[in-house]
Amino acid sequence: MEETKVKVKAFLSRFFRKSEIADDDDIFALGFVNSLFAMQLVMFLEKEFSLRIQPADLDFKNFRSINSIVELVERLKQPA
């Protein structure tokens, strides 16, 4: 889980260079997310962690914070 968090933070830091984001900060409320960024994030997660994010998983609650993103990745990495 820690390795996943490190990779997610590294990806986010490329977009939020001037801001330090805490693991539970709501990136939507902070105004960091737009539709282009959201698609880049989904594509990064699918490629980096070799998983497929289904339409049912495209819920804001899964992407609100670093912790929620990591929880989504860890859940999707589990065998079905």
Image (spheres, rainbow, N blue to C red):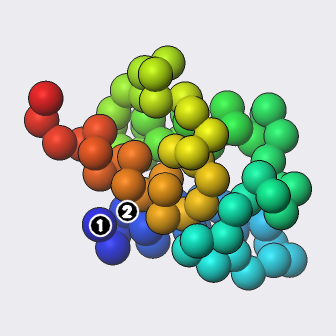
Whole-percent x, y for residue 58 in the image: 55, 29
Who's the residue at 70% across and 38% down the image?
38
SS for dot 1: loop
Residue 71 visible in the shown view: yes
Spatial distance from mark 2 to mark 1, Cα to Cα? 5 Å
In front of the other: 22 or 9: 22
Q: Which residue is mark 2?
A: 4
Label total for image = 2
Which residue is at a point 38% across and 55% down the rendered structure image?
Answer: 71
Q: Which quarter of the figure has residue 31?
A: bottom right
Residue visible at 29% across and 39% down?
Answer: 76
The answer to whether residue 2 is above or below residue 68 is: below
Q: Is residue 32 left or right of residue 44?
A: right
* Mark 2 vs 1: CB contact within 8 A: yes
- Decide: is 34 above or below 11: above
The quadrant in which the C terminus is found is top left
Type of the residue with mark 1:
Met
Residue 11 placed where, x, y %?
A: 60, 59
SS category of the residue bearing label 2 = helix
For the point 62% across and 40% down, the residue is 60
Locate residue 10, reporting x and y percent: 57, 67
Q: Is residue 33 left or right of residue 56?
A: right
Residue 7 visible in the snapshot: no
Q: Position of residue 53 (x, y in %)?
A: 43, 28
**Crowding near the residue tagged with mark 1, few <14, some 14–19, many ≥20 C-alpha atoms within 10 Å:** few
Which label number is shown at residue 1? 1
Question: Who is closer to the viewer here, 56 or 42?
Answer: 56
